[in-house]
Amino acid sequence: MLGRRKLSLVSSIFLLLVVLLPVVFSEIPLGSRLSVESKNHWASPNGDFAIRFFNRLNEYGIGIRINSGLIPVEKQQVVWVAGGDLRVGDKSYFELTNNGDLVLFDSTRGVVVWASKTTNSSVASAVLQNDGNLVLLNNKKDIVWQSFDTPSDTLLPGQNLSSSQVLRAASRNSVSSFYSLRIGAIGDLELKWENDIVYWRSTATPNQSNLRAVLASDGAFQLFDKTSSPVWSVFSQDHGDADVKFRILRLDVDGNLRLRSWTKNSWKVVWQAVENQCDVFATCGVTGICAFNETGIPVCKCPYSLSSVPSSKCLLPYQQTCKSGSSMIKLDHTSLYAIYPPNETIISQISSDQCQNLCEQDHLCTASTFMNDGTSKCRIKKTQYVSGQSGFSVSSVSFVKRCSDPIAVIPNLSKSKPANPSQNTPIQDPHSSICVSCVIGIGGVTILVFVVIHLGLTGFWFYRRRYSFKTRAFSGDGPNPSGFLALTYIELKDITDNFKHRIGKSTFKGVLPENQPVVVKDYGAMNVDPRKFRRLILKLGSIHHKNLVRLEGYCCDPSYKFLVHESLTNGSLESCLEDPGVRKRLTWRKRLDLLLAVARAVSYLHMGCREFIGHGSLGCENVVLDENLEAKVNEFGLESFLGGGGDGGGGGGVCARDIRDFGSIVLAVVSGDPKAERGGCDWAYEKWVGGNVAEIVDKTVEGGVDGDELERVLRIMFWCFQSDERMRPSMGEIVNVLEGAVAVDPPPHPSACCKIPSEEGSDSDSI
């Protein structure tokens, strides 16, 4: 009897622990939820892994982390994150819905920002396996979705990286990382920066297909062919060491691929792809160039900064608008390369002096690098955004151009040597006599200098009055943001030639001093309080992205409200698609890059700023193209801030509308018809389902279309059109799909996709 009571007591305690502990040890049933506030988690049966929310800079992500008691909590690594760089608010949750869909709900925006899209897969439960793989199972216990198929920045032992998958480094900030690991077209592993620069690769295996990379538990990282035979292998320093329980392969934020093992009390790097960290392309970003300090640690420095004021950016000092002449700074043992854009002009069979002179004589050149490695090549850069490396092992020499500072001309009033006095000249007492010639000379020079200074100041005042615009401070709510030009209405009439050149509704061409073309738009028709308009300018002043149009100035007189933007050569995407000549230049590659640029810009507005910013009126008319047909997004956030868009600060309705509008842009770009966005998605979906995708594509596209890329673009477009806002992807997911980093499922019919909802700003909180 006593034994039974003890057994009953133990059973009761065990049941109590199961109820009270916020952990699921086996299958995760439908309807289960994790939340930031509850701080609960789901664990693998062996307890080595757990999925939970984690805090990063007062924002939260949901991911799988190593949970073993052998590793201190502060050193437990996150090995998978839902949605990559997605961050959510402090009341968010992660749920396996009753429909079998894993969803991440963001309390800040009030929408589902990530989903496994498994609603129609008959999901019965979920399991976090002992190997760290989160899987969704149907009633037959078949895996219908798994986290191993959507890696973030880490591979675990036993996890495959196929040719359709990408490992992407975590971001240093809110903007998606530019570094990725993927299997290249020639059958090798590639470390890439953006989509252009390959800075490391494994041995190529030509004519191989269906390759996959696998991290083994013994510390081997191998590339296998379709017969599961290894075609390339590397082995860690501790390969085969049975005492090592945990290993991870991670693409780090600095762009290097490293294999780590948990030994004793720390994670030890036992292999890395790029031995010299400075060989990683743009590892310092825009903060400088890479060099090793006295202790052998790579650091970022800015050797060509001319300012003593600390800055987060290290830009070349020369600007192409420089009017005061230029000089060159020589940097020995330094190699520089352009990163935005990563394009350079290469000239062969040239000397170091000629390389310097070529840059000095080219007013567009910002820097040049002579490759002193026997190739005699000179690399000319025409951007301020460069990176590079320096050190005694670097043979190259670089030349950086800078504007010459104005020199204050001070007259050299040297004394004349006095004549030798004759014997007949009486010696004069200096205290009792005055040098009349000295007085006359000094007085004359003083008057002359005064007249010159007066005339110079008067001329300068008239010059400034006629040809320059003074940057003014705000009259009310704060400082003038980022040095924008604060213009009066009279000055606006001057730069627009009295609003003579209209290029759109309330939009005019203008020219700033030094012949800088701009676009001036009148917002006077909007009944906006001047204080609110100034707050908008302050907000726009804090937003910087290479795919967003730059604000150059503003006018906020009592009766007038204008914004002045940079002008791009080819104008709006709408006008380019209507122009047969420009439209013909839009190859398939150009169109895909265009869509990716727009997606990155809107993704930055949604997730990269200090707070959510919705565009609110995204369309072909608000996408503009430069001379290279590269896209930038214009007029972002105006509806939210000026039009009373309801949720401009929170995001739900505006976010969903931006995604739908992006789908419309995709349809217009693919079809070549800017009006296709107004009701063509039903027709396009029918063509896609019927296998007639060629009828959707613009017939003027030269050079052909990549079928796989077209399929990916159309699928994500139809997901953007879904009438149920919760089914639409986030802009971050759209970027990943367009980059080819993640696969995309076939979309259902976007019912009523072309109809504008009656309540544009309504949110849908239900899951």
Image: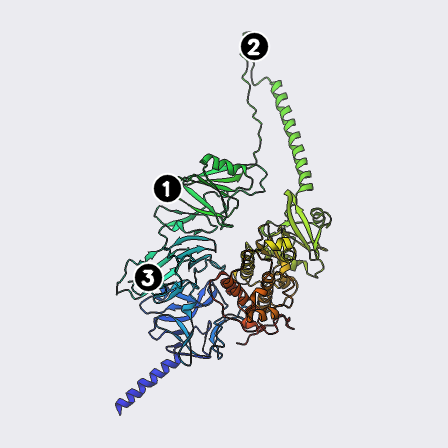
The mark that comes first in sequence, 1 or 2, is 1
Q: Residues within 10 Å of mark 1 (few under 14, many from 20)?
A: few
Q: Residues within 10 Å of mark 2 (few under 14, many from 20)?
A: few
Real-space CA distance between mark 1 and mark 2, rounded to the nearest whole angstrom? 70 Å
Labels in figure, total: 3
- Counting from the top left corner in percent of width and height, residue 268 is at 32, 59
Q: Amino acid at mark 3?
A: Pro
Classify residue 601 as left or right of residue 233. Answer: right
Name the residue beneath numbered marker 1: 392
Q: Is residue 89 above or below residue 259?
A: below
Q: Is residue 228 above or below residue 16?
A: above
The mark that comes first in sequence, 3 or 1, is 3
Q: Amino acid at mark 1?
A: Phe
Q: Secondary structure at mark 3?
A: strand
Q: Secondary structure at mark 1?
A: loop
Name the residue beneath numbered marker 3: 230
Q: Nearer the viewer, residue 286 or 486?
A: 286
Real-space CA distance between mark 3 and mark 2, rounded to the nearest whole angstrom? 108 Å
Q: Amino acid at mark 2?
A: Pro
